[in-house]
Image (cartoon, coloured by chain):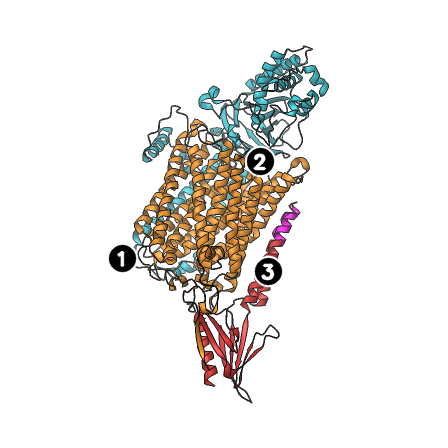
Chain colours: A cyan, B orange, C red
Amino acid sequence: MSHTNKSKRPYLPSRPRALLASLPPLDRRMIVSSGLLLTGLLFHSQARAEYGLNFPEPAAGVAQEIYDIHMLTMGIATVLLIIVFAIVFYSLYFHRKSRGYHADQNFHTSWFGHWSWVIVPVMVLGVDLTIAGKADIVLKKVWDVPKEENIMDVKVTGHQWWWEFDYLDHNIKVESRYIPEEQSGDLYLREVDNPLVLPTGVKIRFLHTSADVLHAFWVPELAVKKDAIPGYITETWAELNREGIFRGQCAELCGTWHSRMPIVVESVSQDKFAAWVDGQKAIKVAAAAEASADKTWSMDELMTKGKTLYETKCAACHQVTGLGLPPAFPPLNGSVLTTGPIADHLNIVINGKEGTAMQPWGTLNDLEIAAIVTYERNAWDNKTGDVVQPADVKQAR
Amino acid sequence: MSTTTLTHDEAHDHGAPKGWRRWLFSTNHKDIGTLYLLFALIMLFVGGASAMLIRMELFQPGIQLLDPDLYNNLVTNHALIMIFGAVMPAAAGLANWMIPMMIGAPDMALPRMNNLSFWILPAAATMLLLSFVVPFFPGGGTQINTGWTIYPPLSVQVGMSMDFLIFAIHLLGISSVLASINIIVTLLNMRAPGMKMLKMPMFCWTWLVTAFLLILVVPVLAGGVTMLLFDRHFGTSFFDAAGGGDPVLFQHLFWFFGHPEVYILLLPSIGVLSHVIPAFSRKPLFGYNSMVGAMIAVATIGMVVWAHHQYTIGMSLGAVTYFMIGTILISIPVGLMIFNFIATMWRGAMTFETPMLFAVGIVLMFTFGGLSGVMLAVVPADMQYHDSMFVVAHFHYVLMPGAVFGLFAGVFYWLPKWTGHMYDEKLGKLFFWTNVIGFNITFFPQHFLGLAGMPRRIVDYNVMFTEFNVISSVGAMVFGLSHLLLLYIVIKTIRGGKKAESRAWEGAKGLEWELDSPPAFHTWTVAPQIK
Amino acid sequence: MVRSDVQIGSRSTQTVFVVESNRNLSWRQSKWLFLFLAGCIGIVSFYFASLGAWLVLPFTGLEILIIGGAIYAQSCCAHRKQIIRIDQSQIEVDEPPRRNALKIFPKAWSKVVQIHDNQGWYPSRLLIGSHGEFIEIGKYLIDDEREQLAHQLRCAIEGA
């Protein structure tokens, strides 16, 4: 828990927080393992991964506030639950027929019976107002995205089934995809190829949108969760206060591979971030140079490049086998499109197809599109023998 | 001058209803109630089996049993079957059986409509089944991988099975609207002379409010899914941003139905509790008027807080503040209800037969679910909880005790009345304990999963979530299988057992206990006396 | 509900039975019930129509029609009423809201017929009439009331 943030909030009740946070990890583990024993289960996991009973430690100011209001409401809920349980169990024990207790037939006509319908709601209202009052303050902070000039904008676009992060101020785009189990091991479904690298100490505004269906960007340490809705742009913000790697997942059901949309935020110092930005720009320049060079590529080169690109960019929908998932995602193997005129094929890849999940891929460079199209026209049973060069793509744009 | 007494058969060509005709053409409230309960029991097992498959898949990380789409289809079906197939028909079954007996009416107001509203249900269930089966055939399209919320644009991508589902929802809606109208008319116009509205049994009150909620919200859902159908096939773009529509509009339509639906599931069980707890505490319900008031308040506030299911869609600050405060305020009437139950038990002379055990379980666990509901109502905190396993844990803690256990309590409470036999008390208690313990093992650990960052509706998860998922799955198997015991108890009771008296329970009050157990096919041959 | 009354007129003594079905709502209250339900549904549907979901309207409209029909049909049932006047020579059976419903039977030839279903599947029935023409009385009564009514009718017919 961040202490710098803690001091800013005098209204923070320390008791419920301290109660739960004071549990050392060892105790938590014991609680869980005794639970395991209770179920009579001898379970042995080769991968002893971390698991928690509560939210992970927040890494942003707003996340800390959210964590605190969570602990407050949970504390209140726990106290109320204990009171209710105590009363009920007292009653269950003492007011039993088997103990010879005679029912008090006039209990509901006493003064308490007459006025309880006022007393109880007033008491509940008091609790409600306590919660709502605190929640309202935090809510305003969460909802009001700072309107500062130097805020850093990151556009988060959800796709089926990967994330696209646009650093609008740096003109960098990162595509983030899950890594198959063989390569990611214990971090499977929590690890991506290109993480979202963010600097600490800078206010960052996330602009969420989607290219196809609903998604939701959720990293518990940042605590911001907003739906990515096609046609909408929703905002959240965060200011990271510590370095580290924070993992999250897509939270809104988005179809077949909803489970394969991890998010990894790499929080780094501002210096490291600047270095990373330079590195990304250099890569981009190099790629652009390679693509625009007037080189004629061989079939083998394009096929190798195309296969990698296809499997990262296209295979989520059209499948590695090229069979697609009809009817939403049509097959490419043996289809009219991939075996017909090259111009039509290029057109759909560059401009997308309206009304379907096929988005325009015009943002890819000429070489990448050439490689993908060449691959699609020659892979599987599509032995057209066509070789599409970057120059052709340039012409088709 | 002569008087004659003829027997029925001499004067009429139609004899006693027998065989399948008795059930298919039945206009008798008891027969239709039985049909409803039977249907609900079957659907409980279908929905339960899909839940057990889900938990089996989640037993270990990795994809072992189910394809992702099949998994999400089961998630969808589990919700729809349990809500529309099990809980609502079971509550309607109780209503059909008990309401005429409780208010001293000979039958429901519109017996033929009653027949229709039941017999639409099997048709709807068939449609739902088709939506599940169709994708297995060539050309059947993809499975419904959207969850029961069927949010567009994802639901526009799904194949033809979505159309079957839309029609199934229409049929289910028609059925429940017809049943609701029937119940409203019966309750308002067929009470025995002298039974004022505020003397009506609580179960009748809860159903009156439930029926009112249903007729208000079901047409909105019907409109919503029809718009979805139009978007899918007729080129409209109600929900397509590219065509000038709004994908979020569907969420508003859905949750305007979906949130009151929670109270539709809950209230009949609250009604059952208001009979069971006084009966086994041997003293009257603590606050009848405040219960009625609280219920009306819950229904009213419940109608206008639907968007707390969609805090993450990017509403304005004013809108989320309104929905947050409204949602938190629901705790007032709900708190009053729970208080009334506890105060009814307080200083009572309690005994703990199975219905009472379930009732106590509900009071405790529903309080728990309600309190986690207050946590979820807090918008900033919901930024974290939203769409995580925490939400799954929360609504199962509300709906299992709140709705299903209440129905179990009602079934055990009135089973002697319906069948004329006492159920096996030992088995009943065994069922309660396995059920409740299994339930808690299943759902309690899911709170931790959600907080640690596991989203809901994922088929595969990282190893960090393994431990609690294992516990949850083991619990789910115990919980699921325990219902076989329920089936056994019910069958055993129908077939025989100790003869039940008219007043099967020592502390039971109400008109229904003045009738024989089981009551005659036509009740109220003697005018009921309202005290 | 059965109300019976002996009226002594200038010409003769007349016994009057008024047989009515049980109800809790008057026509006026039924109308208000319908208007209340329709109003609530109307508010909801126009709210959503204003958001662009106009396809909600046909469903709510249809529902309002069904509700209206159901309330009307049930109110008709609940307002059934039969007036049986028995005087020296004849029995008049009238069903007031309906015109031309008046049936007159000669008292000397009239019979009160009760039909019981031995299996208990159907409620009993009570008929009154003569010469093969019978009219059912108090279809909406509960068995016990019907039993009493039959007894009273017999007394009135035989006694006078």
Looking at the rendered structure, the kind of residue marked 1 is: Gly
Dot 3 falls on a residue whose secondary structure is helix
Residue A107 visible in rendering: yes
Residue at the spot 48% in from the left edge and 78% down from the top edge? C111
- How crowded pointer 3 is (Cα within 10 Å; few <14, some 14-19, many 20+) is rated as few
Q: C20 above or below B207?
A: below
Camera-near label (1 vs 2) is 2
For the residues marked 3 and 1, what is the alpha-carbon distance in whole angstroms?
Answer: 56 Å
> For the residue marked with disc 3, what is the amino acid?
Gly
Q: Any magenta on residue C47?
A: yes
Checking the image for residue B158, the label placed there is 2
Q: Are marks 1 and 2 in contact (CB under 8 Å)?
A: no
Q: Residue under mark 1: which chain is it in? A: A
Reading the image, the residue beneath label 1 is A100
Q: Quadrant of residue B471 in the image? A: top left
**Disc 2 on helix, strand or loop?**
loop
